[in-house]
Image (cartoon, helix red, strand yellow):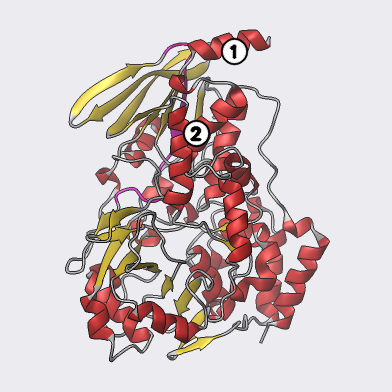
Amino acid sequence: MQNGQTARRDDSKVYLIGGGIASLAAAAFLIRDAGFRGRNIVILEQLDRLGGSLDGAGSAEDGYVLRGGRMIESKYLCTYDLFSSIPTLDGTKTVTQEIFDWNKIMQTSSKCRLIRGGRGIDAPEFGLSEEHILGLERLAVEPEAMLGNSSIANQFRPSFFETNFWLMWCTTFAFQPWHSAVEFKRYLLRFTHMVAGFNQLHGIMRTVYNQYDSMVRPLEKWLAERGVQFELNVRVTDLALREEAGRKSVDRIVYTRRGVCDEIKVGNGDYVVVTLGSMTEASSLGSMDSAPVLNGKADGGAWTLWEKIAAGRPEFGRPCTFTDRIDESKWVSFTASLRDRIFFRLVRDFTGNVPGEGGLITFADSAWLASIVLPHQPHFIGQPEDVEVFWGYGLHVDKPGDFVKKPMSACTGREIMTEILGHLRIDGEAEQILKTSICIPCMMPFITSQFLTREKGDRPQVVPSGTAKLAFTGQFCELPDDVVFTVEYSIRSAATAIYSLFELERDPPAVYKGQYDPRALYRAFKTLHERKL
């Protein structure tokens, strides 16, 4: 049987549509666990580089760019399982070992999680009332079917959204009150073990460099060494399906490359794995002197592909749930590259944290609800010693700023930096900082689309019913218990897809469930009640 399977895999190809972490992980699982030859794996990506939302680009001269950075923590078991097989770029250890070694040295412990009235707050109280706590506990045990497509705002009184707990929770994970109560519930359960140290960001882990340099590049190198084919600048526009014995499979992959339309014939023994949707689809960049523009789903290929293949096929999900409410899913991030050390020195002195130690700093009074992160430097491989890079974002992008009287969405990089300097009460040094900075804003219309209220069936199963040799991965397929907007979710979806398609006698590592760990549950309960009003 095993020899037959090996022979079949020698003849079969797997086409992975999308070049983000889900497809890269799927390719690795195919090689490591399913015995596939790398040369029989093809990744089709519409951009000119791999990595998807785990990106990192730019230069010291033109400014570095990070659209975002996903939080990681010790219970991301799928992520660490994958990267335990992937060497670092220098080959000295595995990526997993590097992450754990690094976080023994650089442990996150914020002394300034919130800034209010120009003053930093060390270990903020949660500010929850007994009613708020009971609401959280009720939500934690409420069946998802009972919650349906309700929002977080449907579950709590308005006073809940004025607490420090909500302020820290929503900015750590990018939740809005109108987002899904089911997703909020899943986060409460998934991160039960982190509640006790949440106001100082204890337990949040970082990579040595940005996640593109520390995770994507080593994985891409490992795959390339094994012959995986990367087809870049390829925008897949349709999948032509065939039906045999009541099961649908892909017959042809239709795509364009540099304006020329073509197709790939998919053999009877071939497989197709599609990353559905994209949280960073249709992003646009501004500059120091220009604001980014707001694009839509037609400005990229991922959403339009999903819409096309899902038309008339309810088992493929309902993409319109996630694409048609941009005002509920957009926000603006920004990356600042600084050629003067003044800013980092002032923030270090203000917060009491060295870069890389403090994590997210949120300006509680900010009309934009802006936050910044000063990572350990260098944050990019090859970053010059005299350049420092930090990242930030705002959740309320359509409200006028407090120091720049414009919506964040309409602001240039210079204006965003001016707003941040104002909240830090940096005045005398502001001119010098602005003169030596390159701040690049990024508008992301779909960045929290995976959090939007939804119903059962809006997200399809990883392997849809009635299909053969076809699977879906990424943030918009359904994985019970785990939480979207994480690297872990994408990698878990990839493992689930490969192990299911090839009927391997293994499962992805189980989701850690701290709500069933008496110690974690007790610490969370004790913390909530100790830090109430």
Vertical placement of residue 210 versus 251, above or below: below
Q: Quadrant of the C terminus?
A: bottom right
Residue 83 point in image, percent of width and height: 57, 42
Q: Please name the residue that numbered disc 1 is placed on.
A: 6
Tell me, yes or no, if residue 313 can be seen here.
no
Residue 430 coordinates in the image, percent (x, y) = 27, 85
Category of crowding for the residue at label 1, using alpha-carbon neighbours closer than 10 angstroms: few (below 14), some (14–19), many (at least 20): some
Q: Is residue 279 above or below residue 60?
A: above
Q: Residues within 10 Å of mark 2 (few under 14, many from 20)?
A: many
Q: Which mark is residue 472?
A: 2
Q: Is residue 326 above or below residue 262?
A: below
- Magenta range is 267-282
Give the image quarter of residue 504: top right
Of the two numbered discs 2 and 1 on the same chain, state the one appearing first in sequence: 1
Q: Position of residue 291 (x, y in %)?
A: 21, 65
Q: Amino acid at mark 1?
A: Thr
Q: Is residue 275 magenta?
A: yes
